Amino acid sequence: MKNKKVRIWLLIGFIIVSLLLIKQLLAQKFTSVEDMQNYIKGFGIAAPVALTAFQAFQVVVPVVPGYLGCAAGAVAFGSTVGFLCNYIGISVGSILAFFLAEKFGIDIVLSMFSEKQYEKWSKRLEKSKSYGGFLFIATLLPLFPDDFLCYFSGLMRMDRKKFIWIIILGKPWCILAYSILFGMIR
């Protein structure tokens, strides 16, 4: 019972922070890494939670490139804390995107991404012998359409456990590189 209450409060906190971030995104307050960094620091002691929620949100609703949050996190909190916030947020967002696509199908994917992008990747991947291997390599590389591939994976009815393991094992490396690189700017 206690664990359920903690999960509910965490979910409520995540939703509140996400709504605040959505409001700022719609107001176009983030035009640079510094803008996002200052906004995140404005949350005070809750700033790491805000960054984590933002990173999850930016995967589920891909309107801001993920590297901006990685940069802001590393600059605001240093390489280690920035990495942890970014990794947790991006991983949670990736898994949420997968489950959303699995539940709501192609309609949600086409509401987030162009039909042209969907067709392009569908044609490329229908011939793939090992989509799991491809997805793992894609999560390792920077500037790959990871958000799209998380949704796409949900459409492919990929095994949930396999997808989660690919995210857990593949995501940290690129995020770590960003965290170290941008943490040096600090």
Image (spheres, helix red, strand yellow):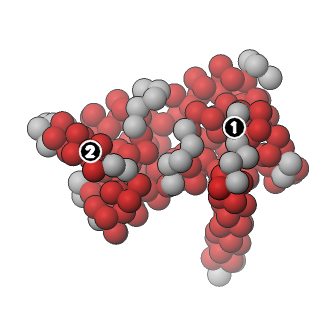
In the image, which disc is placed on residue 116?
2
| Residue 124 percent across, percent down from the top left | 18, 36
Instruction: Sort mark 1 into few (<14), some (14-19) or many (20+) by Cα contacts within 10 Å.
Output: few
Where disc 2 sits, the SS reads: helix
Give the residue number, with chain letter if any, for mark 1: 31
Residue that appears at 28% across and 61% down: 106
Dot 1 amino acid type: Thr
| Residue 184 percent across, percent down from the top left | 74, 18
Between 84 and 37, which is closer to the camera in this rendering? 37
Name the quarter where the C terminus is drawn. Answer: top right
Q: Is residue 83 left or right of residue 155?
A: right
Dot 2 amino acid type: Lys
Residue that appears at 48% across and 37% down: 171
Residue that appears at 69% across and 60% down: 23
Name the quarter where the N terminus is drawn. Answer: bottom right
103 lies above or below 152: below
Where disc 1 sits, the SS reads: loop
